[in-house]
Image: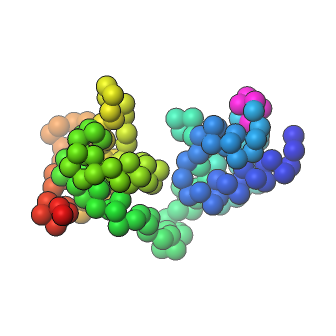
Amino acid sequence: MNKEEKRLIEAALFISGRSMSLEEIRTLTGIGALGYLQSVVEELKNDYSEHGSGLEISDADGKYEMRVRPEMAGRVKQFAQEAEISKAALRTLAYLSKHDGMLKSELVKKIGTQVYTDVQELVESGFVRSHKSGRSSKLTLTEKFRKYFVQGAQPVVPDESQQTLPAVSEAKPQEEEISE
């Protein structure tokens, strides 16, 4: 196993600030064998675990990300920077907040073709989830969106008798503010 490959993957996970798929890591490293690539990432993940680092490499849904260990997060969170997204993406996100579950094709009709870039940025930043729906994609807001933008948001609880998230529209700008 090449140490330079591990170092490159480690640097990419650190600097990206988001989850990366094995396909993205393959493009970065040029390693064609996904099984081998996965073993390199797993070895890197174990290195962080064995050394008792304040960071860890986690994996979910086939994507890997470097993050602060949960037991350390509370002590260092005041140093974290807010997620930055472009003004155009923020405008698109504001529109989606009023129309959760909208098809991307409908969003393009309402706002214009620049939403393709905006949606990609919002998906990568974790505020929106995109699911294939026919020939288009259905766009839904994520829990991360609710934590950042819905004041006093509660975790979603399966028991309907308990309090759930407040209506998303409570924290959104008026539609007139985003129309041009």
Residue furthest out toward the right: 2
In depth, the one of 136 and 131 nearer the eye is 136
The image quarter containing residue 64 is top right
- Percent of width and height locating residue 22: 64, 38
Main secondary-structure element of the magenta-colored stretch: helix
Q: Which residues are magenta?
A: 33-37
In the rendered structure, the answer to whether residue 15 lies left or right of residue 145 reads right
Q: In the rendered view, would you say 34 is above or below 7?
A: above
Instruction: Tally the numbered discs.
Output: 0
Residue furthest out toward the top: 134
In depth, the one of 124 and 81 nearer the eye is 124
The residue under the point 34% across, 62% down is: 88
Residue 45 visible to an observer of this rendering: no
The quadrant of the image that shows the N terminus is top right
The residue under the point 17% across, 37% down is: 160
In the rendered structure, the answer to whether residue 82 lies left or right of residue 145 reads right
Residue furthest out toward the bottom: 79
- Percent of width and height locating residue 75: 53, 69
Q: In the rendered view, would you say 8 is above or below 130?
A: below
- Percent of width and height locating residue 31: 77, 37
The quadrant of the image that shows the C terminus is bottom left
Magenta-colored stretch includes residue 35: yes
The image quarter containing residue 60 is top right
Residue 13 visible to an observer of this rendering: yes
Magenta-colored stretch includes residue 36: yes
